[in-house]
Image: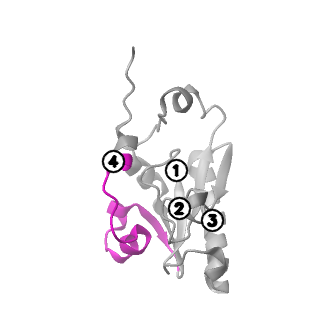
Amino acid sequence: MKQIWAPWRIEYIQMEKPEGCILCEKPGQNSDATNYILYRGDKNFVIMNSYPYNSGHLMIAPYRHIANLEELTDEELHEHIEIVSRSVKVLRQVFNPDGFNIGMNVGRIAGAGIDKHIHTHIVPRWEGDTNFMPVLSDTKVINEALAETYKKLKGKF
């Protein structure tokens, strides 16, 4: 029997989840590189997912702590979508993916890991990036370290 090692996944599963909201706390800290914050708009920001589905997995979130899409103001919503569009453009330029998964999980039952702070996921996809690993071993292969991805994307916004 072969063993498959995926430490990034088990770390997230077993870690004690913080009491607060990381999407509120991280932008309040003065450490964008440590927190993988790539861009700060007036109402929303871009942060890399620390437990990505693929390299370049980004999240766009409003600074304001709200749980539902309909709670966004017109200004927040407009900027949010502009930043999603800009993020796709940057990811195309830097990584040249074949496609994207873009979406929101609203509420825990819908799969939201951070269910009280709405955010949009952007996951770059490449032809052939889905293989036997997730099916047979619940393991996703991420080909690049977060710090390297951050260096490639920072400043492109």
Residue 84, disc: 3
User: Mark 1–mark 2 contact, CB under 8 Å?
Assistant: no
Q: Is mark 3 on a helix, strand or loop?
A: helix
Frontmost of labels 4 and 3 is 4
Q: How far apart are marks 2 and 4 (CA)?
A: 22 Å
* Rendered location of residue 126, percent (x, y): 63, 39
The N terminus appears in which quarter of the rendering? top left
Considering only vertical position in the picture, is 40 above or below 15? below
Q: Does the magenta stretch include residue 27?
A: yes
Pick out the residue farthest to the top: 1
> Label 2 sits on what residue type?
Met
* Rendered location of residue 137, percent (x, y): 48, 28
Q: Is mark 4 on a helix, strand or loop?
A: helix
Residue identified by numbered label 1: 56
* Closer to the camera in the image, 146 or 130: 130
> First in sequence: mark 1 or mark 3?
1
Give the image quarter of residue 74.
bottom right
Residue 59, disc: 2
Is residue 90 visible in the rendered structure shown here? no
> First in sequence: mark 2 or mark 3?
2
Is residue 118 visible in the rendered structure shown here? yes
Q: How crowded is mark 1: few (under 14 residues within 10 Å), some or many (20 or more)?
A: many
The magenta span reads 12-41
Position of 156 with respect to 151 (left or right) is right
> Label 1 sits on what residue type?
Gly
